[in-house]
Image (tube, rainbow, N blue to C red):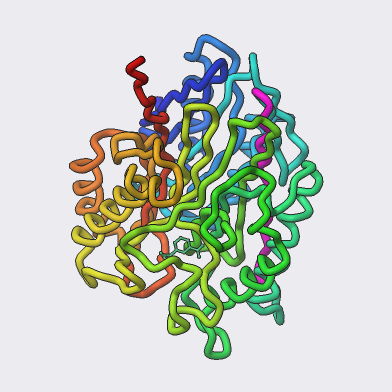
Amino acid sequence: MGVQHHTVIQVGAVKRLAIMVTPQCGGEFKDEAWEALATIRAILRQQNEPMEVTMQTVFLRDRDDVPMAELLFAACYGDKMPLTIFVVQPPCEGRGIAIEAWAVGTRHAQVAYHGEHLVTVDYDGMRWIYASAGSLHREGRTAYEQSLEVFESMQRALAQGGASFEDVVRVWLYQGSITEEVHGVERYRELNRARTDFFANIPFDKRPLPSPHNGHAIYPASTGIGTRCHGLITACMALQSKRDDVSLLGLENPLQISAFDYPKEYSVKSPKFARAMAVRVGNHVTTWISGTASIVNAETVHKGDAMKQTEQTLTNIEKLIAPENFARHGWADAGATLADLAKIHVYVKHPEDFDKVRQVCERRLGRLPAIYAVADVCRPDLLVEIEGVAFSSIRQTKSLT
Ligand code: 3EB
């Protein structure tokens, strides 16, 4: 079996799994990939109920392995192919592949596979919509045009699933040559300009799910990071529900200026995302934490020191999900700690920093499902970026009567 870690999240009747897998045996890519896929199957079969994978992110060392990976995954999953994105970011452990997957128990949940770019999951009066889009570089097309096109294709996929962008909770953006300048403008800045223009037409200030907002639109939580492939690979997750105990909360970080308020020196049009998005279902809160880095206010801190950047990043996450921050945003009975993280994803800029970064993460977080991969973070001085998901419960106020 490959090296695997998974977290079981049981809320009500529906069981969910967060799975991280790295093959144990090195070798040819094909063998590593089969081992990783077989490990996921084994984990699913060990649960004492039928489970299916709904969404997965596949991290690959080599761009040339993408076509083979697509074939193997299609053969493995058949007509139950999860929403899958292939991201060229070398796994830090040195293997050719690592997989992050979400699975759900199908006794009480209905999973529908609508083709390559759309999967929907229905249970307990909730509908989760996973959509993706990708676009390779084309001669003569700008990063702005490419980014706009990708947001528009995600929108079409969502529409096919009966959803729209104002239902979106979480977005992932993997951009090739993210820090490259074309005609004097960085590609990531052009992505930000396109996202701003595209989001201007989405009523995020009137989200269908109830959400306290403090005078600003609640953008989805997000990750915006590099990939070593020529293109822009994206995925998003939306939620719809008519239940009156389901609501949303966009969180900003008390230690940071909101990304959408970053000064112009970082991007003419600021990055439109929330630092985290919390979804409350009854007494349970799931918090999707955006890619978080060693930024205080709007500035990078601990330049050149990967260890200190990791410490700062974890402190930023700690403060973001703390009860005080939830209270400040309007949910006085919610909040989480680093111990509530169900999984993390760590992006390391330089492979030689991996051991240092992992040491800090393991000391502060203990053992949890984690994937470390090499990626370009969008600012030259940022050495690490971490995203994750936290599960916590509402504090019950004891009645003394
Ligand atoms: C930062 O805090 C680091 O452009 O969607 C983190 C998460 C970052 C998401 C995005 C960028 C994005 O600004 C970079």
Residue 310 percent coordinates (x, y): 25, 56
Query: Main SS of the magenta segment?
Result: strand
Q: Give the range drawn in magenta.
A: 124-137
Left or right of 44 on screen, residue 3: left
In this orientation, which residue lies closer to the viewer: 254 or 390? 254
Residue 33 percent coordinates (x, y): 51, 37
The residue positioned 52% from the left and 25% from the top of the image is 16
Image quadrant occupied by the C terminus:
top left
Extreme-top residue of the structure:
48
Residue 317 visible: yes
Residue 121 visible: no
In the rendered image of this protein, does residue 15 appear above or below residue 367?
above
Where ligand 1 lies, by image quadrant?
A: bottom left
Magenta-colored stretch includes residue 125 = yes
**Quadrant of the image occupied by residue 25:** top left
The residue positioned 64% from the left and 40% from the top of the image is 239
In this orientation, which residue lies closer to the viewer: 149 or 280? 280
Left or right of 167 on screen, residue 267: left
Left or right of 54 on screen, residue 348: left
**Quadrant of the image occupied by residue 291:** bottom left
Label count reads 0
The residue positioned 22% from the left and 51% from the top of the image is 355
Residue 325 percent coordinates (x, y): 36, 50
Magenta-colored stretch includes residue 127 = yes
Residue 85 percent coordinates (x, y): 59, 48
The residue positioned 36% from the left and 46% from the top of the image is 321
Image quadrant occupied by the N terminus:
top left
